[in-house]
Structures are given as C-alpha cells and as structure tokens.
C-alpha cells in the first residue's frame, strides 16, 4: 500500500509504522489520519504481522499534535466530525487485537499524546515530553484524550495535565503510569524492537483475547467483566496454541505458536 505521510517497514512478524511529516513535527492532519486508518486495517488482517511499532520520523517529535491549520477553520459541525474521525482511527489502533507499541521519540503533545495512549504499550525516549496543551489554543482534547488519560493516570492527575496544558518529562510520565518504560533516546528503537520481538513469539489468539479482556472489561462492572474473561478463557482452550503451549511446558521446551 502507498501512503502519503507514513513509512511502513516489515521485519518478520513486526511491522514498523513511521509517521513521516518531520517538517511539521509529524503533526496529524486529515490525510495522515486516513493513512493511519488504512495501515491499521491492513495490518490487522495480515496474519503474518503479530506486533506493530508506531513512531515518528526524526529525533524531535513522535507527533507534536494535530494540524493547527485544520483546527483553526473548524465549525461546530465540522469540529465534531473531525473529532469523531480521529477517535475512530484511535479506536482501531486500541482494539486491533495485536499489540501496538508506541515508540515515543520526542514530543507527544495533543493528538500525539492521544495517539500514544491508544497504543497497547508505550516506550518513551528519556528526552520525550508528553502532554495535552489544547487549553492554550482555547480547545479541549478531541481524540478521546480526556477519557484515556483519566483512565491511565487517574482523574486528579489528568485534570492537572489537561487544565494547565503543561507537558511532563518522560520520567514523570513513567512515574504516573502514562508510559510503561523509558529508554535512552539512542536506544529507543532497539528497545522497542526487542520488546516487539518478545511479544511476536507469544500466542497471537491469547494476546488478542488479553487485549479484548482488558479494553472491554475496564468499562464493565467487575462481575460482568469477570464473566467476559471466563468466556474468553473458555474459547482460548480450544486453540492449537493452547495445546502447544501446555505440551511444551510439560516437555520443558519452548513453544512454537502458529496463531491457530
């Protein structure tokens, strides 16, 4: 597939997607969002891909935000449609059923922070800064940032970040649970690839069910979420991967998962 604003690299079972607008710090415009939508749908259907790494071109920015040129001309109707379109793309990322690792190589602000939060896991360079500075433009987050941030770091911390608009450093993002790991900037992509390679060896169906159980269960009452988990557990026991995994454990060898 050809993309205007993305680069796609395949490394075995790992796909590396790079947002490629370095001249504007990889800002998200309508075309970039559509490119993301198409690549995620394509990779979700590709059985040869087990893990996706998402990063930004250059060494300054993951995604510095949405394209302000587009935001400045929104009307109430078009603004709502714009926000819903972005939310749809980020929902596809969050629920694609394969781990998506955000390799945050610099600024992740506004829509960039929202994009990172939609990913399954987040590794930040020690030089990265994350935040929701929309308040400085007289705006609010529109790609579900108010919702994902509160769920990740808690209501009080999310309120502080969104109301002040002040970005935080990578080590603070790690402390509050906004990112999972911090790496030296020079090692970021190597560490992201290493984690992706580890996940790519795991059972794909079990990983998909884990992602589903966490994403859907967190929105449900505990009893219903536990029932949902039990149903997925029952389904996964029917897979060849479960039989291979348990057999390999008993035989004291590494399993070879096929995704069936």
Image: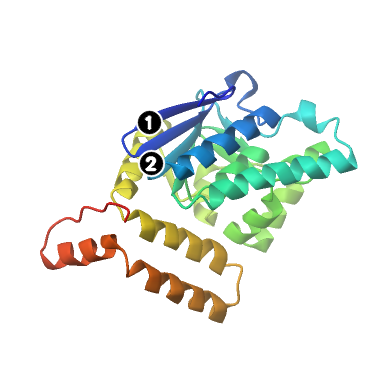
Foreground residue among 32 and 174: 32
Q: Farthest residue toward the top?
A: 23
Drawn side of residue 22 relative to residue 200, left or right: right
Number of dots carrying numbers = 2
Drawn side of residue 144 relative to residue 234, left or right: right
Residue 37 can be seen, yes or no: yes
Residue 223 x/y as whole percent: 54, 81
Drawn side of residue 148 relative to residue 106, left or right: right
Residue 110 x/y as whole percent: 68, 40
Vertical side of 23 occupied by 114: above or below: below
Q: Residues within 10 Å of mark 2 (few under 14, many from 20)?
A: some
Tell me how far mark 2 sits from mark 1, CA to CA: 8 Å
Residue at x 56%, y 65% (from the top left corner): 216
In the picture of the structure, the residue carrying the numbered disc 1 is: 10
Residue at x 53%, y 23% (from the top left corner): 2
Badge 2 element:
loop
Residue 147 x/y as whole percent: 68, 56
Q: Name which quarter of the figure residue 78 lies in.
A: top right
Vertical side of 69 occupied by 248: above or below: below
Q: Name which quarter of the figure residue 31 lies in.
A: top right
Q: Farthest residue toward the bottom?
A: 223
Q: Farthest residue toward the left?
A: 251
Residue 192 x/y as whole percent: 38, 39
In the picture of the structure, the residue carrying the numbered disc 2 is: 49
């Amino acid at each position: 597939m050809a993309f205007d604003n993305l680069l796609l690299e395949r490394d075995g079972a790992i796909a590396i997607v790079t947002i490629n607008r370095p001249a504007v710090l990889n800002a998200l415009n309508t075309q970039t969002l559509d490119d993301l939508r198409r690549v995620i749908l394509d990779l979700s259907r590709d059985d040869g891909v087990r893990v996706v790494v998402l990063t930004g071109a250059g060494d300054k920015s993951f995604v510095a935000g949405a394209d302000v040129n587009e935001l400045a001309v929104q009307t109430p109707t078009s603004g709502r449609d714009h926000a819903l379109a972005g939310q749809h793309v980020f929902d596809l990322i969050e629920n694609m059923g394969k781990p998506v690792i955000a390799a945050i190589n610099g600024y992740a602000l506004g829509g960039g922070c929202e994009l990172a939060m939609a990913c399954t896991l987040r590794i930040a360079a020690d030089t990265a800064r994350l935040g929701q500075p929309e308040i400085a433009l007289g705006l609010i987050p529109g790609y579900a940032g108010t919702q994902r941030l509160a769920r990740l770091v808690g209501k009080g911390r999310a309120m502080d970040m969104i109301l002040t608009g002040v970005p935080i450093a990578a080590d603070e993002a790690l402390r509050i649970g906004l990112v999972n790991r911090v790496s030296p900037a020079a090692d970021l992509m190597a560490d992201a690839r290493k984690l992706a390679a580890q996940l790519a060896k795991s059972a794909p169906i079990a990983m998909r069910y884990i992602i589903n159980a966490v994403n859907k269960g967190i929105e449900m009452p505990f009893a219903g979420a536990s029932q949902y988990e039990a149903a997925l557990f029952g389904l996964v026991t029917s897979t060849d991967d479960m039989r291979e995994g348990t057999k390999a454990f008993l035989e004291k060898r590494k399993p070879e998962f096929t995704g069936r």
